[in-house]
Structure formats: C-alpha cells, structure tokens
Amino acid sequence: MPPLIAILLLGGPWIVITIAAATGLAAFEVFALLRGAGYPSIPILGVVIAVGLVLDGAAPKVLEGSGVTLIAVGAILAAVGAFTRSDPREGLPTWFATVFGSIYVSLLGFVIRLGAAGPSVPPAAPLAGLGAERGWIILLVLGVWAYDTGAYFVGKRFGRARFLVHISPSKTYAGLIGGLVACTAVVTGIVVGLGQPVATGLVLGPLLGLAAQAGDLAESMLKRAAGAKDSGNLIPGHGGVLDRIDSFLFAAPVVTLYVLAAVH
C-alpha cells in the first residue's frame, strides 16, 4: 500500500509506468492460467498487445479510436501467429486465447483513462489539492479496497448463505452487502471531497462495488479452470499480480464509463 499511495500522489508518468508494468506481469500470469486450462496461446504477442493498449490510454488525444485500431491489429497478428500451428484445432483456440488474454488484462489501462476523463475539481472542494487525475484514481483504488475490506469482515462475521460456489466457495450474500455498504460510504465521501453531489456517490458506490466483485469472480473462474489457487507467486503470501488487480480490471472501466456518461 505505501508504494502505491506514493505513486498515486506523484501522478503523471509514474502512474502510467506502474500500470504498464503491472499489466505486463499480469499478462504472463493470464496466459499461464489459460495454458493450464487447456487453451494454447502466444504469450509474448499477447503481452505486447496488452501493454500497447495500456500505453495508448496514456495519450487519448493522439489518434481518435486508436484503441480499436490496436485491437484489430492485435487480432490479425494473433491469427497470423495461429496459422503456424499444424493442427487447426489447436490454431483456433490459440487465436482466441491470445486475443482474449490480451484484451482482458489490458482493461487495467482504464485506470489511466479514468485519470484523463475525470472532471476538474472545483478550487473550493475539500480534495482540490489532489487534482482530477489523482483524485478520481484514488477514488477507484479506495473504493475497491473498501469493498474488499467490508466484504471480508462482514462475510466472516455474518456470512452463511453463499452464492456462485462453483466459482468461488467463500463468497456470501452478507459479505456482498457489507462490501457494497463500505464501498458506497467511502466513494460518497471522496466524491463529495471532489466537489460532486452526494447522489453521484450513492449511485457510483454500488456500481463500483459490484464491478469489483465481478472482476474477482472472473479471475476465480479462470484460476478454477486452470486448477490453480493463485495466479502466481511473485508476491509472497499474496499470490501473483493478477490476484492483486483482478477487481480493478472490471471496476476501472465501469467507473470511467460512469464518469464520462453521468458526471461530465
């Protein structure tokens, strides 16, 4: 947490470098999990595509629609790479898995896009000193952490009925509610600090929490298909990079789209 908070406070290129590095490391873990699940891929190409999509988010005004163009080029390159597989029954899933893995993990790039898309903070707002980029990204980070914390403690104390046990046996309805309440409280407080109305936080909080939970479940499904407990062992006691960012892969796009559609 301390290094991440320091990077967020520094802002600018430090955030881009961190997100790009995390994406590259997580991409290798994704392709390892896909291989474990029986889906061949072209990992190096997938990592390059994923990092390229993230870096594209750092320059949103350079070329309009460049992200879609990069996805198209990546899909073509993955198809060409799959042509080298002697059995088309291996080549086809190689193509699909390479494209899927790269796009899936590149969703982390929406953290950068959120920083660029967030509306300016009024000078009189309590958190005006953070600025728009850092303010909205901190909202995302603290919102996800609040959801995870609330879900853990409430689920551990009151959790009985479980849901989607075929994907993740530890998820409970009580934890879901606790996470949403904690996330909404934190997000609303930060939203007000950024000069936005309370209603924005009351809507954005549950959306962010549900997206974070969906991101966690998506990675759990991938790990379960691969027969893996963690995505990797890069972080002792915490698994891999993907285990740390899974919630952000879904939460970052949802918050960015909401800000673009409803806050501006």
Image (spheres, grey):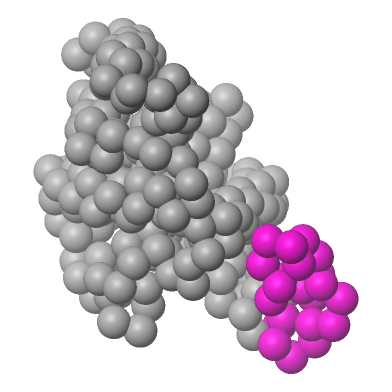
- Describe residue 246's horizontal placement relative to residue 206 as left or right: left
Image-quadrant location for residue 196: top right
Image-quadrant location for residue 179: bottom right
Percent across and percent down for residue 73 are: 29, 13
Image-quadrant location for residue 53: top left
Percent across and percent down for residue 93 are: 47, 29
Residue 170 magenta-highlighted: yes
Q: Is residue 248 visible?
A: no
| Front position in the image: 188 or 90 | 90
| Front position in the image: 147 or 40 | 40
In terms of secondary structure, what is the magenta stretch mainly?
loop
- Looking at this view, name the residue that lies furthest to the bottom: 157
Q: Is residue 236 visible?
A: yes
Residue 172 magenta-highlighted: yes
- Looking at this view, name the residue that lies furthest to the front: 86
Q: Which residues are magenta?
A: 154-174
| Front position in the image: 99 or 128 | 99
Percent across and percent down for residue 216 are: 56, 58
Where does the N terminus fall, quadrant-wise? bottom left
Percent across and percent down for residue 194 are: 44, 49
Residue found at x 43% / y 29%: 90
